[in-house]
Amino acid sequence: MSAIADDLRRERAGPGRQRNRRRANFVIFLGPAIVLTILFFVIPVIIDVVVSFTDMGRSLQITGFTTEQYEKIFGGDRRLVQVIGLTLLYVFATLAIFNLTFALVLALVTTATNRMTGNFFRGVWLLPRMSPSVLYILLWVWVINPSEFGLLNQILMSVLGLETPIDPLNEAPVMLIIIANGFIGASMGMIIFTSAIRAIPEHLFHAARVDGAGSMAIIRHITLPALRWPISFVTIYQTLSLLVSFEYILLLTEGGPFYDTTVYALYIFRRAFDTGQYAYGAALAVFIIALGVFFALLGWRFFDMQKLLQRPRIEVQ
Amino acid sequence: MARIEFRNIAKRFGDVEVIPGMDLDIADGEFVALLGPSGCGKSTSLLILAGIYLPSGGDLLFDGHVVNDVEAKDRNVGIVFQSYALYPHMTVRDNIMFPLRFKKTPRDEAIRRVNDAAALVQVGELLDRKPSELSGGQQQRVALARALVKQPQLLLLDEPLSNLDATLRLSMRTEIKSLQDELGVTTILVTHDQIEATTMADRIICMRAGRIEQIGTPDDLYDRPSSLFVAGFIGSPPINLVHGAAANNTVDVAGVPFPADGANGSITVGLRPEHLVFAEAGLPGRIAQIEPMGREVLYVVSTDIGYVRVLEQGSVAGHAAGEKVQIGFDPAKSLVFDATTEKLIDGAHVRPPA
Ligand SMILES: Nc1ncnc2c1ncn2[C@@H]1O[C@H](COP(=O)(O)OP(=O)(O)O)[C@@H](O)[C@H]1O
Ligand SMILES: [Mg+2]
């Protein structure tokens, strides 16, 4: 009603005012986003690319332009191969085991149980995401403490009767970072999948049950097909965020022991800020920027992300 | 096919008692309609029958066996939901075949049965489409095919026609009815549309707020409604209801005396518009409004007891607006209800004022 009135008023005001108003709307609504994008994306990317063609080192001085950083990436850096391999393993395993499968199981279980219990459980699961990373990792540090006072060791020794305490940080560091990231990563998928499951009309479940489908058949034939889009979305989004974020790993293992848990993003960080190879770090970062942009565009096209902008597909409650 | 029995079936959702306790018998092969206003517990009853809801109390019997603990998937019930509930990502073929997947039907036979069911409801041409590519009427047919393909012992239809336009509704009514005749499957049709119920069903179960108000043939409910509620619910245009005080074989309605038999105290008189006629003598009034209804004409007559609806056969109005008329009726067709209990008083009748 009022939208129509607005339109009428605008029409009466004439094309000139309308154009001005549209321009004003543009500035008001898109302005902040554009400023932020330029400030925190475009400018840093330009600086990064420029730095990557220099020899900037610990002294932060630039003596000349060079392509030696790129030559190093494509030939000189043997550690890089191992880092990339680890990154692929880390991203794929975290995504497949936790961010998708575990999130899906959580969503299915919490929607199948009583609503109150489900909400409570999901709330608890969200707590670590809402608390500061440092706090979350501090909890993990306590859990995996290699002495008999760590939570894990207490359980293993008193409940399962293990003789000597174990030290996951040194014995299974890759598994540790996958689990630590996965536990928090699963919560996003859980929330999105839960909303999507809730949005499935109840009649479909009733119809399927009457048609003879058991729980597993219902999940397979009714729930999962309805989750196609949310699963795609979570996959693309989490791949991106797993590729570029490293704060939990940095806090938990500092990339160690040695370089065992140094994923690509952390490798850039360590090269630049630990060993002071700023130019080399910048060159490495160029690739992750390109990869990020590529993934975002791929997601945009392949998973029909445009639809996300058109109308709400999920109801967050 | 199955004989269905409700023995004191109750259903509560938390603190809300939707069905307090329902007794019901449905014969094998019968076509019954569950009729009642929206929210009276019709769909809930169907979902109890289908095994989706567990009754909070009482027993449900199929062919004399208690099936309370039989899961939905093992009840062999076909159901058509109001929203059709077709599986959106499956083709029409896969939708219809879905129930057969779980019956371990050999592939050849499954395909044959899907084709048969599709042909039965005339959607044979649409098998490769998705539900979103179908019209409402086509979706409805597909839903019916999906319910019939497993050769259910009980067919449940939850307001299957309410989303269709008027013409389609009319033809689907006949089609569903003749399909049911042909297959002989026990069928329960849920509807809030009394015309749907009276034209399709052998028997009508009239419900109100989770209770059965009356069970009977369409004629029973029309001729001898057991309560004011049923009288008001069945019949179109709706029955005329006027309040009066009965004493000494006379009912006083707003000052107009109607001779009466068997009535006493505070009562409500029900007169169906189609039972009223314009006569030489009777209740005097003036025609206030005329509504041609095709083969009938509805007159709204302004009288001392209020507006009275009179339905006359014939496509042309024989009277003009403003005309003075006298309304008469056959006393045997008048209905008298106790105003407090709202129940029909057997044997009580009123006669037109002299
Ligand atoms: N799952 C449910 N939880 C709580 N209340 C319900 C549920 N299903 C139905 N009801 C309530 O039960 C009553 C009857 O519902 P329903 O059987 O759908 O009515 P009808 O089909 O006759 O319109 C309504 O008041 C409705 O709000
Ligand atoms: Mg209903």
Image (cartoon, rainbow, N blue to C red):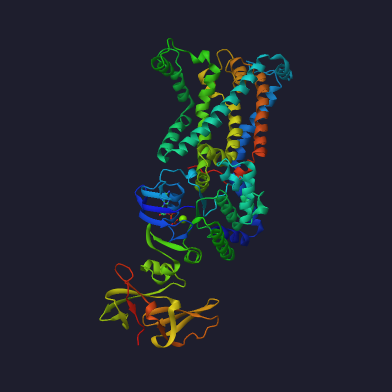
Q: Quadrant of the N terminus of chain A?
A: bottom right
Q: Is residue A13 above or below residue A72?
A: below
Locate residue B248: give its quadrant: bottom left
Vertical side of B126 occupied by A105: above or below: above
Residue A289 coordinates in the image, percent (x, y): 66, 28
Q: Nearer the viewer, residue B234 or B304?
A: B234
Query: In the image, is B97 to the left or to the right of B242?
Result: right
Residue A194 % position (x, y): 50, 39
Is A285 rendered above or below residue B92?
Answer: above
Between B210 and A307, the one lying in front of the other is: B210
Q: Is residue B92 visible?
A: no
Q: Position of residue A8 (x, y in %)?
A: 60, 61
* Total count of labels: 0
Q: Nearer the viewer, residue A317 or B284?
A: B284
Outermost residue to the top: A164
Determine the image quadrant of residue B272.
bottom left
The residue sitting at 53% across, 81% down in the picture is B314
Q: Where residue B49 appears, x then y in whole percent?
A: 44, 50
In the displayed structure image, the side of residue B130 where residue B351 appears, left or right: left
Which residue shows up at 51% across the image and 35% down it? Answer: A190
> In this view of the protein, which residue sits in the foreground, B230 or A130?
B230
Q: Is residue B51 visible?
A: yes
